[in-house]
Image (cartoon, grey):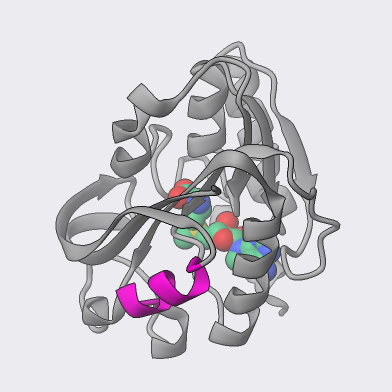
Amino acid sequence: MSDAAAWDARYDHGGFTFGATPNRYLESLTPRLRPGMRALALADGEGRNGVWLAKQGCVVTSVDWSEVGLEKARALAAEQGVAMETVVADLTQWDWPRGSLDLIAWIYLHMPSAERAIVAARAVEALAPGGLLALECFCPAQQGRRSGGPRDPDLLPDEAWLRHAFAELELLECLTGTVLLDEGPKHQGQAEVVRGLFRRR
Ligand SMILES: C[S@@+](CC[C@H](N)C(=O)[O-])C[C@H]1O[C@@H](n2cnc3c(N)ncnc32)[C@H](O)[C@@H]1O
């Protein structure tokens, strides 16, 4: 089974694996959002973050390699009365936009380090001047905890990786710490995360 097929299988149920409400870090960035911002919800899964951004007035593209996830994302958008473009694609192969995005939301996209570096480089190139990249992921200290996230340590970025991968961007904040997750059945409890907010100069 390919990784995309594995995610299809994980999403093939009636509920929302990571909830239907946005990630709290992304939500905390509300004061920085403006209607009409061109936003990319990276690896948007069942669409909770993309749909929320669309509700804030952003023009959203939601990309994930899981067709099942994005079908649920489209249903969530319709239920909440917002429009959102959805694209089924592998982010390492996708034909990324260049220099045009005002916001990229990278929320719990965990990839092998070599692929993560490719996606980070594409994301940097995709931002318009002044565009923001917001990231929250589990970090290496999350290994072995039951509140969520992958087991393979190569999938867990740390703060040093963020600072290096997005060095071309202005660093607005970047930190590692413990949060209390309450995001659907698969993100529950105390978790070790890394968060970052970067801006294209
Ligand atoms: C932990 S889920 C997070 C989903 C969503 N961002 C959220 O916070 O609810 C990780 C997502 O990454 C997607 N994903 C992983 N690798 C990908 C790739 N190479 N291309 C596209 N999507 C990918 C999976 O399909 C899955 O939906």
Within the image, what quadrant is residue 71 found in? top right
What residue do we see at 44% from left, 54% from top?
170
Q: Was residue 119 drawn as part of the magenta stretch in this picture?
A: no
Q: Position of residue 56 (x, y in %)?
A: 49, 18
Q: Magenta residues?
A: 157-167
Q: Is residue 143 above or below residue 69?
A: below
Q: Quadrant of ligand 1?
A: bottom right
The residue at the point 70 percent across, 51 percent down is 126
Dominant secondary structure of the residues highlighted in magenta in the image = helix
Which residue lies at the image location 70% right of the left edge and 57% below the top edge? 125
- In the rendered image of this protein, does residue 50 appear above or below residue 113? above
Locate residue 153, reporting x and y percent. 39, 88
Q: Tell me the quarter of the picture where residue 128 sits.
A: top right
Q: Is residue 157 left or right of residue 10?
A: left
Q: Residue at x 65, y 18 (%)?
A: 78
| Residue 149 x, y percent position in the rendering | 36, 70
The percent coordinates of residue 144 (x first, y second) are 23, 83
Viewer-side residue, 37 vs 2: 37
Q: Is residue 9 visible?
A: no
Is residue 176 shown to the viewer in this render?
A: yes
Q: Residue furthest front?
A: 201
Reply above or below: 85 against 125: above
Q: Considering depth in this image, is 101 or 147 the residue closer to the camera?
A: 101
In reply to whether residue 159 is colored magenta, the answer given is yes
7 relative to 133 in the view: left or right: right
